[in-house]
Amino acid sequence: MRKDGYAVVVGCANIDICGKSFRPVIERDSNPGLVSISYGGVGKNIAHNLSLLGEKVYMLTAIGGDSFSAGLRQNCERAGIDMSRALMAIDERSSVYLFIADEKGDMRLAVCDAQISEKIDDKYLSDKLDLLNEAAVVVIDCNLTEKTIAFILQNCTAPVFADPVSVTKAAKLSPVLGRIHTLKPNLLEAELLSGVQICGEESLQLAGERLIEMGVQRVFISLGANGIYCAQRGGSGFLQPNIGCDLVNATGGGDAVMAMLVKAYMEGCSLEQTARYAVAAGAVAVESAETVNPQMGMETVHLKLSKSVVCCENIIWVRGGPEDGKGRSKASIPRDAK
């Protein structure tokens, strides 16, 4: 049954500044290349995808009073995100992520100035509790401080969906796991939070069961190119393979998946339906050069499902997985057999 209402995303919105060298990077020198500015952030990307999927969405975030602030707010509003409750911290710098990429597009160096995220605190959120509690779903990303995450989970009566963002930041969820409705970790984050080392299908299932035992209602563990492991309280887990896509940019795939988990929940979908919609949304997302595919929408997702070809066959379980340039743990720990 459809859950009427709106979603609230509590998290970061930031400016991404990328400098891509035309040739191999020479350190301590000026490198000819291309500099681009875009708007992103885990929370902002999830909210944008939700808007494209047809949901009313508010974003609770902090925006500074610098030269970037007007563009960031306008970009969010043009994306259909309600920013009327966002905090305008005029004495602060907006969140900026600056990175240098080599000629192949691989990040070589990055600096993240996200101190403004500390302004998204209990003082700011305390008079937003009515908005939070009356929402169909509240989404948090772990760029928030541990104190803020605890405040939301201890005071919010609406179902809370959590994106761990990275292994380091996922640890903030450990003290309040039992209050989370839906959790979307990757393998490394699932290992940290469950205490189970995942090296095969049995340990993957055990990790999912352990998280459910800790109080999480539903778990969707990202397996990168191989799909999502899904489990919920009172049911058995299963692997939902990915579907075929023409990969262009994998950066925003996880944000689109989280948005679809929210959308499917609001539509009253079963776990199996939710899983299929989630991998389809992820496939749509990565077919665009932009972090959020402007073609995202339920019509596009349904079309992707209608033409779907399962692309997960044999999995080789390998250890490792560095974090990418934005502090996210790479989710592609299991890889297709060659």
Image (cartoon, helix red, strand yellow):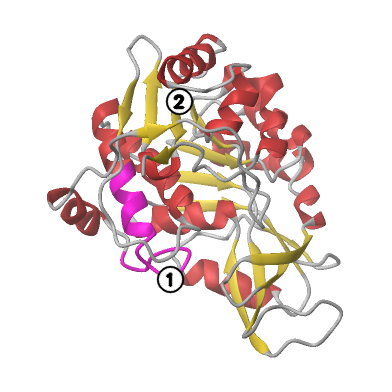
**Is the N terminus in the top left, top right, bottom left or bottom right quadrant?**
top left
Q: Which-is-in-front pick, marks 2 and 1? A: 1
- What's under tag 1, amino acid-wise? Ala
Q: At 51% from the left edge and 68% from the top edge, which residue is drawn?
A: 77
Of 312 and 2, nearer the camera is 312
* Closest to the observer, 75 or 301: 301
Residue 315 position in % (x across, y down): 38, 33
Disc sitting over residue 332 in the figure: none
Side (left or right) of 108 relative to 203:
right
- Pointer 2 residue: 219
Q: Is residue 267 visible?
A: no
In terms of image quadrants, where is residue 131?
top right
Furthest residue toward left: 306
The percent position of residue 191, horizontal first and vertical second, equals 60, 24
Mark 1, secondary structure of its residue: loop
Q: From what the image shows, is residue 83 above or below residue 36?
A: above
What is the residue that sits farthest to the bottom in this orientation?
A: 32
Query: Would you say residue 150 sits in the magenta stretch?
Result: no
Q: CA distance from mark 2 to mark 1?
A: 29 Å
**Is 28 displayed left or right of 144 in the figure?**
right
The magenta region covers 279-295
Pointer 2 local density, CA inside 10 Å: few below 14, some 14–19, many at least 20: many
How many numbered marks have been drawn onto this rendered protein structure? Answer: 2
SS under mark 2: strand
Is residue 135 depicted above or below 46 in this figure? Answer: above
Mark 1 — residue?
289
